[in-house]
Image (spheres, rainbow, N blue to C red):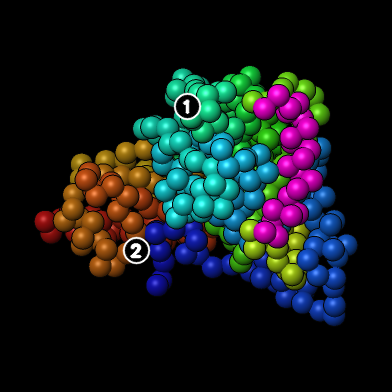
Amino acid sequence: MKHSFGSDNHSGVHPQIMQAIIEANNEFATAYGEDQYTKEVLHKLEDLLGGNCTAFFVFNGTGANIVALQGFLRSYNSVLAPASAHINVDECGAVEKISSARIIPLETTDGKVTPQQVKAGLTGFGFQHHAQPKILSISQPTELGTLYTPEEIKELADLMHSHGCYLHVDGSRISNASESLGLPIKEFISDCGVDALSFGGTKNGLLMGEAVVIFHRPENTLPDSNGIPMNMLNMEAAKNLQYLRKQTTQLYSKSRFIAAQFNEYLTNDLYLKLAGQSNSMAKYLAESLKNLKEVEISKPVESNAVFAIIPQWLSEELHKKHYFYVWDEQTNEVRWMCSFNTTKEDIDEFVKDVKEIISRH
């Protein structure tokens, strides 16, 4: 496969990240994250997010979401999430199976939930026949490539906290959000009241490995839905992360190889440079296609995803040469993902083929 627009997971590993893994592959190091190198890199990540938080490395994005959410949940709780959320659509029921908590999907047209939509799910408190709402999980960027503003995230965090509940952010593409917003991650995560973050890197040049971050929130002394001060549950979730990670089979023995990747990733803003490339290529792709009447850009292009509604004959012909997914078979809405190593030449070839197919039809 020369180039894929199917997923940013289809791309390879950035050369600097691969070199960092090679350089970490010498002599011996204590396993399971007990080595000093892993601890130092975790502190580096915590500092990037403003401190006053606890970070742990895990294998993958699904595992990161499960570990992050589990710390706040009991089996009788529910997780509110957009209907399009990865935890609801693409994780095979993993959150529900492992935590036993129920996911309550919230309908949305652009992948983002509004406070009004969330309020509709904040019901049944104290009613023994209903699952008890405990945490809202949103994605930044969303599964549809759209972005929350810091103000929107803060409003959601404040709403959840006012009901004794919490806010989790699935940040599998968090670097793309930061680059597109032009803001440090802490300014739209920790500064806005987020309680838990899944910090991704595999979709942006890493070989493997994500991080789970729990924010301590010492200032939040409101009682939660069980009457426990909310800052105490944050601290309890942070303390229990290591056990939840082990139970969820997300503890990697040779942790220094994940740490080495993150160390390089966070040095000299490499994570932003890679995200900037994929973001800019998505915008270039959308701009190159916008004047074709057969192509309707269907979602705002705010990160590294382009959604478009095209005729079925066009997608069928295009599939013969280029890999991508049909997102909605009813409308033939497709998703074209750009990666850290997508180039203008890749886009130009793709657009040339689109135009050539249209000219023949």
Asked which secondary structure carries label 1, the reply is loop
> Is 184 on the left or on the right of 77, as rendered?
right
Magenta span dominant secondary structure: helix
Q: Quadrant of residue 59?
A: bottom right
| 3D distance between C-alphas at marks 2 and 1 | 38 Å
The answer to which of 56 and 280 lies nearer the viewer is 56
Q: Say which residue appears at 16% left-offset and 56% top-offset.
A: 313
Which residue is identified by label 1?
121
Quarter holding the C terminus is bottom left
Mark before the other along the chain sequence, 2 or 1:
1
> Is 200 on the left or on the right of 293, as rendered?
right
Q: Is residue 227 magenta?
A: yes
Please provide percent x and percent y for residue 84. Answer: 41, 41
Q: Which residues are magenta?
A: 226-247
Q: Say which residue appears at 30% left-offset and 53% top-offset.
A: 326
Q: Most extreme residue toward the left, as rendered? A: 361
Q: Quadrant of residue 238?
A: top right
Asked which secondary structure carries label 2, the reply is loop
Q: Is residue 93 visible?
A: yes
Name the amino acid, label 1.
Gly
Name the amino acid, label 2.
Tyr
**Quick check: 353 above or below 199?**
below
Q: Say which residue appears at 62% left-offset and 52% top-offset.
A: 64
Q: Is residue 349 magenta?
A: no
Q: Is residue 270 visible?
A: no
State which mark lies toward you, 2 or 1: 1
Quarter holding the N terminus is bottom left
Which residue is identified by label 2?
323
Please provide percent x and percent y for residue 249. Answer: 64, 63
Badge 1 density bin: few <14, some 14–19, many ≥20, Cα 10 Å: some
